[in-house]
Image (cartoon, coloured by chain):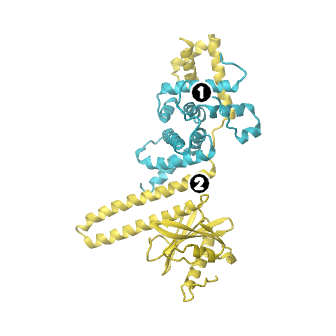
Amino acid sequence: MTHPVLEAQLDAYLDGELTADDARELEAHLVQCPDCARFRDGRIALRAAITAHVPALQAPDALRERVRASLRVAGGARSRRRIAAPVLWRSLALAASLAVVAVGSWRLALQRAAGGALTDQVLASHVRSLMPGHLTDVVSADQHTVKPWFNGKLDFSPPVYDFAGRGFPLIGGRLDYVSGRAVAALIYGRRQHLINVFLWPAAQGPAGGPPAVTRQGYHLLHWTTPEYAYWVVSDLGIAELRDFAALLARGDSAAATPARSAPAPP
Amino acid sequence: MEPNELERFEAIVLPHMDAAYTLARYLTRNDHDAQDVVQEAYLRALKYFDGFRGAAGGESRSWLLAIVRNTAYTWRHQHRADTLATQFDEELHSETVAHVHPETVLLGETARASLRHAIDGLPREFREVIVLRELEGLSYKEISDVAGVPVGTVMSRLARARKRLQEALRPERQER
């Protein structure tokens, strides 16, 4: 055998890819061929150097979190679509014989699917807002700056409060989209945590969703007032987030009184 | 996707994230792109998971690494003009590219630095077989599956890559 062929065999031998018979033959040759033995020693030295100096890497924790979060969002959206479709077909089949019952369950199923998809969308908006440069369109701790900023950008004027005195300072506002509708996003802070408040007119936007749900470490709270549908999302502790939601709900009900323009102090 | 299908995906595929990151890191040669590639690859993997029915750990790892590899190449195509994205030539001798990582400078270990530089400086077709074999421990067959080339090509690329790395380790010694 020529040496180039033997070198290929030697690599396969050192990589554990040679059959036992070929390996025995090669070992016999190595004993009496200094060139091949030198070649083998060079490869062994290289492997030792790689093992010592070029370790396999560990995925950063931040990446793990990112991947997990994006999988949940993507997987959640997929499962909603898949579940919604068969329910629809089954319901249509049933409708032939049991029209009333079928339509009822069909509506319910669609509402449920819509609520779940809405949760996904709100969460996706929150996660997206945390990426660099996406959090705020208008940065201001002053509600009288943030509120007018939405003029002309939305078909409603969202109530904006500053809860700095209660430890939830206003950070700014952002135009966002949920279910194809332009919505107001208000950003509040709590220590190093961020809170996104999404709101839109209750009568004119996507509806549904659980009042409280936790996904990937984020808490989502949802409620509807006569005027607005609210979603609050944060990685803040659930107890503190509920405190914040209570402040917000109180502020809104105060604003719903005749003295509408006056922002309600908490 | 069944509600617990995502859990099944996570249980089977998430454990390979270190391997995915290692490959992406060596293919993109920077941490930021590597992270983006891994995230994108996982989303693609989720999309194709219905078609994947392998159960063994090695199978799912090769499967994921093939997606990481393809994602890294399309990523490079879409996001940056790479200096080494020129037409690949099996015989081409490319110079070692000076990608100096801060930690290698601080350590000042010449063997480590020169070996890492040498790997980063390999054409990507050589780099991927070295990483898959030496760092990930894949078999020739698995590498052939991941890289989409015959086992014979895997072997010749490995041999050339190793030869070049050995030269980098011993710059004072000329090639015989």
Label 2 marks a residue whose chain is: A
Q: Are marks 2 and 1 on the same chain?
A: no
From the rendered image, report the letter of the chain displayed in cyan. Answer: B
For residue B161, which numbered disc appears in the image? 1
Vertically, is A196 above or below B168? below
Q: Nearer the viewer, residue B59 or A164?
A: A164
Q: Residue at x 42, y 43 (%)?
A: B53
What's the CA distance linking mark 2 and mark 1? 35 Å
Task: Please give the name of the residue rendered at 63% of the width and 32% of the height, measured from the top-left corner.
Answer: B121
* Residue kind at label 2, given as amino acid type: Glu
Q: Is residue A44 left or right of residue B42?
A: right
User: Mark 1, chain letter?
Assistant: B
Using the rendered image of the protein, determine whether residue B85 is visible from the camera's viewpoint: yes
B130 or A171: nearer the viewer: A171
Mark toward the viewer: 2 or 1: 1
Closer to the camera in the image, A81 or A22 = A81
Image-quadrant location for residue B115 = top right
Q: Point out residue B120 in the picture as x, y percentages from the top left corner.
A: 63, 35
The circle on residue B22 is none
Mark 2 surroundings: few (<14), some (14-19) or many (≥20) residues within 10 A: few
Element assignment for label 1: helix
Q: Disc 2 designates what residue? A: A65
**Is residue A45 something one can see in this rendering?**
no
Q: Position of residue B102 (x, y in %)?
A: 72, 42
